Image (spheres, rainbow, N blue to C red):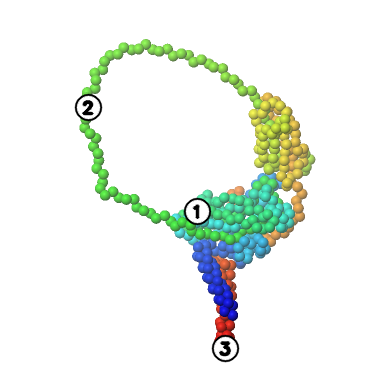
Amino acid sequence: MLKTRFTILAAIIFLLSLAASQTATAREQQQTNLLQNPSFEDPYQGDGVAEGWVAWHRESEDPGACSGPYAFRPMWSRETNGSLVQDGFVSQHIGNQFDTWAGGVWQTVNVTPGSTYRFSFWSIGRASNEQYPAPSDADVNLGVRAGIDPNGSGLWSDSDVVWGGAGSPHDLGNQANWQQFAVEATAQSDQVTVFVSADLRGANQCRAHLDVWFDGAQLVEVGPPPTDTPPPQPTQPPQPTLPPVTNTPPPPTPTATSEAPPTETPEPTATATDTPEPRGVICVNAFADENANGQHDEGEGAMAGVSFTLAQDEQVVATGVSTGPSPICFDDLEPGVYQVAQSVPATLEMTTGASAEVTVSEGQTLEVKFGSRQRQAVEDDADEVASSDTVDSDAEEVVTVDDAEPAAPRSSLLAMSGLAVLLIAVVLLGVLIFMLLRQRA
C-alpha cells in the first residue's frame, strides 16, 4: 500500500512539473511571437485567407502553351487535412490548376525602430499531374521564400523588401517534407510587413495540381536597437606645430652649357600578324509545334526548357537549354560533320526528329530547329477555392491587396495540452487523498 502511495505521488509531481513547464513555454512563445494568428487557425475570411492575414498575388500575360513564365491569379483556402497541417488544426492553402502563379499572404506588425527581427514559417508543396497523394514533381520550381519590408508599407513590389532564400519543399508522397523558411531585417520605422510567398512561374511548369501549404509562422526580435555612444571629447585643444626655421642658401649662379646634337629616332618596323581563319557556327532552337505537323508555322512561338547536345565523332562538344525566342549558338567550330540532338522534359512530346546531322564549312552559320508540344493534360481535380479582391493598375503585374482587420492572438496547442495535464494531476491528487482518508477510517 505504501509503495502504491509513493508511485501515485511521484506521478502527480511529474505531471505538475510537466504542466508548469509547458505552460511557461507557451506563455514565452506568446510573448515573443509578434504575429497575429501565426498558425493560420480559424476563422477564415470570405476570400479563403486566415484572419489576421491579407492575400496578394502577381498577374502577367500567358505566352501560350506554357512556353514561358506567366502568373495567373491563384486560389486561397483553409486546409483541414491533418497530413497537410504542421501546427495547430488548420493550415493556409494556396493553389491553382494548370496555370502557374505567384503570390501569398502578408501581415503588418508594430515593432521598435532600429531593432532586428526574424520572420519564419513552415511550408510544403505539390506539383503533379497525378491525384493526391502521389509524390510531387521535383522538376517544378516552387520558389517558396520569406520577406520583410522594414518600412511596413504592405506592398510586395517595394524595392526595399528584404527576401530570404528560395526553395522547393516538394511533398515526397508522405506529407513529411515540411521545410522552414526565414529572413532577418532591421526595422526602419515603427512597423514592418512580413510576406509569405511562393513563385511557380516558369516555362513548362504547368501541372494539373500546383499547390503550396503554409503554417507555423513566427516573428521575433533578435537584436535590440544599437546604443548611441558619444565620441570622447579632447581634454585640451591641440597646439599647432610651427615648422623649424632654417637658413636657406642663395640659388647657384647658372652656367652656360653646350647643346647636345639631336638623337635620330628610328622608324618603326611593321610586323606581320597571322589572320585567324573563319570558323563555323551552329544555332539551335525549339518551337511550339501546336498542330504537330513538324513545321514551324506562322504564329507558333518558341518552346523553353528543351535541352540540346552538340557532338562530333561521338564526342560531346557543347550543350544548352532553350529559354525563349533567341536561339542558342555554338560558335568557333572547326569545319566538319556534327550531330545535334534534342531532349524534352516529361511534359512535352517531340513532333520532329530527335537528332539531326549537319555539315558546317568555314565561315558558315547553320540554323537547326526542333519541334515539340505539350502532352495531353490529365483529368481536372477540383480544389476548394475562394476569391480575393484585386486592385487594378497600369503595370504589367497586378498587386492584389485585400483589407482585413487583424485578429486577436489565439491560444496555442501547447498551452491547451498543459491545461489538460494539470487537470489529470488534480484528479490523481484527489484519488490519493481519498485512499488516505479511507485507510484511516
Mark 2 residue element: loop
Residue at image location 42% in from the left, 55% down from the top? 226
Tell me the kind of residue under disc 1.
Ala
Q: Are marks 3 and 2 in contact (CB under 8 Å)?
A: no
Find disc 2 in the rendering and name its residue: 248
Q: CA distance from mark 3 to mark 2?
A: 122 Å
Q: Position of residue 81 (x, y in %)?
A: 67, 63
Quarter that holds the C terminus: bottom right
Q: Is residue 378 left or right of residue 328?
A: right
Asked whether 403 or 324 is in front, the reply is 324
Residue at image location 48% in from the left, 59% down from the top? 221
Asked whether 403 or 252 is in front, the reply is 252
Q: Earlier in the sequence, mark 3 or mark 2?
A: 2
Q: Position of residue 204 (x, y in %)?
A: 69, 46
Find disc 3 in the rendering and name its residue: 441
How crowded pointer 2 is (Cα within 10 Å; few <14, some 14-19, many 20+) is rated as: few
Tell me the kind of residue under disc 3.
Ala
Mark 3 residue element: loop
Residue 358, image quadrant = top right
Find disc 1 in the rendering and name its residue: 185
Q: Are marks 1 and 2 in contact (CB under 8 Å)?
A: no
Mark 1 residue element: strand
- The nearer-to-camera label among 3 and 2 is 3
Q: Position of residue 398 (x, y in %)?
A: 60, 52
Q: Earlier in the sequence, mark 1 or mark 2?
A: 1
